[in-house]
Structures are given as structure tokens and as C-alpha cells.
Image: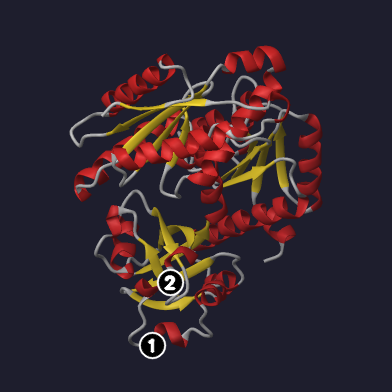
Amino acid sequence: MKLKSSLQNIKILLCEDDSDTLNLLKKYLEESGANLETANNGAVGFEKFNKFDPDLLITDLSMPDVDGLTLIEKINKIKSIPCIILSAYGDENALLKAIEIGVTKFIRKPVKKDDFLKSVSVITDALILRKIFEKREQMMLSVIENMPFQVIVLENKNIVYVNPALLEYLGLKNLSQVTKTGFSMDEYIFDRGDPRLFAKKFTDWSYELAESEESEILIGLGEKNQKDNDYKIFAVNIRPTQDKNIIIVIFNDITRFEDEINKHKRVALLDPLTQALNRNSLNESFDVMINNAKNSSKSFSIIIFDIDFFKKVNDTFGHQIGDEVLKTIVAIVAKIIRQSDKLFRIGGEEFLLLLPDTAGKGAMMLAEKLRLAIANHDFNEIKNLTCSFGVYEALFNENPESIMAKADSALYQAKKSGRNQTKSAN
């Protein structure tokens, strides 16, 4: 389907408070023949929505008075339409909220013309397809043939049609490979995280969802016999037809959107300066460590250490040098510890190590190795620095607060004894 013809048949509302971006996107859309209305803020956008009754909303995330997410929520109360969010920054909470309220696409600024128009094209093609279904036009299959996303048509729980996009993605050559006896779509589905899919066949849950109010789910889809981590994430939308025996299953690849969210989740768990884990991830890691230790009956240990006289470093050499010291300490520790060990920055110059499958003796040996490595390192103009270490082998019935308190007590003893020492609380 040509972009120009698809945009002419779809009404688009564009909301953007930055005039330069608004004019640029307006130009892109109008050059493609869009039936377009614009608004320079969310409040005006909502007024124009009521008058214009658009099929698609494209809105900036951050706007005065009424932001993009609030605008979408207000519109959703009246009418459910596809929405594209534009944003110059990656806000994890905004991304999660966007998924929750059903945002179709998240596009980063600055907007690239080809990517933007391609995203709009995918959605407008889908909107046209939906209108065609509603009008029961006879050209349905020829339109599906040209859809950029993947489509299956089921009749009486049998696959009767698969469009070329899905055939190509699954590594199949023609429709006969799908409609023949013995073919199972379940062999290509690698992730059934949604509880509605557990122990059910693809054809069964597709019809169940077609009859439910919530007809969209997420699955992992890939080629047969591939490795599990090679699959992509698809939003699956089930469309019933006038004939209850026939349903249309539409697969929309949202892998990049999911990857973006996961990336921001990972960033939220890291200390931005040193890239060690931060306190946000400590509680969850502690719980996992305690449960694993209980299940395996193996000990785990904790090390808390900090830099001796670090305030003097900042006062004498400045905070920029102090920051470099923190990053260097983390780099030294990271080279020595195991991949399974976890390093957290829990304070200004204070760090914590979680050591799975490690008894107190092993933790003491590691702490000493780290202490010596740091003490012998040349920190340029500062020359030498030292750290004090507190070690504790945890008991299975202890909570994180108790474990940390005992390791902290050992650290206090190390400092009290003259610093640059390792003490155990066991």
C-alpha cells in the first residue's frame, strides 16, 4: 500500500509544543498527502480531537498544561485510537506508562524523516485494514498481502491464510507449508509469559482472546529450532470478523520498544559515576542471594569496604580527582571478583560486595586480595590510597538489615584498629 494513499484516508492529529518540530513534521505529513490537524499543546489538542475525530494521534511526551500521556488517557476515555509518542529523552517511568495506556509507537527525537513516515505508514495501513474489515470489503486478502506486519487468518481453528511477511519471518516458502496437516504455530512461539497462554495451543487461545474484552497480548516469536534468545517480541492483536468462526491474528514486532525499556531499567540500577550497581538493586539482589542460599544449603558472604580518608582526597585534590578515584577503585575490584559476585556503591566512598557460594574464610581471602591490590595501586598525583574492609558470612535465617549491620560492625573495627585492615564479624 502506498504511503500517500494511506495517509489521505486517515485523519491525523499532531500535537507538538516546539514550533520548529511541529512545522517539520507537518511538512513531512502534508507532503505525503496527510489529512492533518495540528495543535501546539495538549489542551488545544484535546479540543481539536473532539472536533476533528482523528484516526491517529501523534503527540510530544513533554508539553505544558497537558502532557502527551495525560492527553492519551483523556482521549482513551472517549475513543481508543493508535498513538505515537515523540520524546527527546528516555524516561523509564514514561516508557512503562506508555505501554500501560496502550501507546502504539515510541519515537525518539530528533525525528528522522524516513523512520517517522515508515512508522506512520505501518499504523495507517493497519487502520485502513481495520476499516476494510468493518465494511466487509472483498479486497481483504489483497490488502493483507502488502501489510508490513505479520498476519494469520483462522477459520474454525484452522490456519487458512498467512501473509508473505509472516511466511518470510518464519522461514517458510509458501502457504501450503502452513495449511498442510501437521503444521503447528506453537513450534514458533518461544515465550508464553502471559498466563492466559499456559498449556494452550495457539489456535485455542486466539479464539478465546477474540471473545474477550482484552484481545492483545505479548509473545516471543521466531524461526523453528532456533535458540531461545534469538526470538523477537510481538504484540499480538486478535480481530474478530462478522463470521465468528473466522478471526484475524495480527503480529506487530515491538522488540526495539521492549529493548528500550529494558535498557532504561538496567540504567536505573547502576551508579551513573562508577557503573557499579546502586542501592535500588540491592534489596532485590539480597533476596535472591538469601533464597538461593537456602535452596542450595551453601553459604554466602558480604564485604563492606570504604576508602580511608576520602574526604581529605576531595578537599586536597578536588571532587573531579575524587570521582576518578572512585571509578578506579571499582575497576580494580571488577577485575578481581568473579562474574557471579555483585559490587554495589552504597554511599559516597562506601561499597558492598555480595558473594554467592562463599564461606567466611573465602571472603576474608578475597577482601585481603582487594585491600592489597588497592594499596599497591598508583593513583597518579595522589600516589597511594587504602581501604578498610568488613567481612561477614551470612546465616540463612538472617535478613538483609542484620547481615549489613554485622559487616558494617566489622568495618568499624577495621577503621578503629588503624585502617587499611580487614576484619570479620564471624
The spot of residue 342 in percent (x, y) is 43, 41
The spot of residue 125 in percent (x, y) is 61, 59
Helix, strand or loop at mark 2: strand
The amino acid sitting under disc 1 is Lys
Q: Mark 1, mark 2: which one is toward the viewer?
A: 1
Distance of mark 1 from mark 2, alpha carbons? Answer: 15 Å
The residue indicated by pointer 2 is 153
Query: Where is 97 relative to 136, above or below?
Result: above
The amino acid sitting under disc 2 is Val
The spot of residue 96 in percent (x, y) is 48, 38
333 or 152: nearer the viewer: 333
Q: Is residue 383 left or right of residue 97?
A: right
Q: Residue at x 75, y 41 (%)?
A: 110
Q: Is residue 72 left or right of residue 315?
A: left
Query: Where is 91 relative to 243, above or below?
Result: above
Where is residue 185, by image quadrant?
Answer: bottom left
Helix, strand or loop at mark 1: loop
Q: Residue at x 38, y 72 (%)?
A: 154
Q: How many marks?
A: 2
Query: Where is 87 relative to 336, above or below?
Result: above
Q: Quadrant of the N terminus?
A: bottom right
**Mark 1 or mark 2, earlier in chain:** 2
Q: Residue 52 has which mark?
A: none
The residue indicated by pointer 1 is 180
103 or 161: nearer the viewer: 103
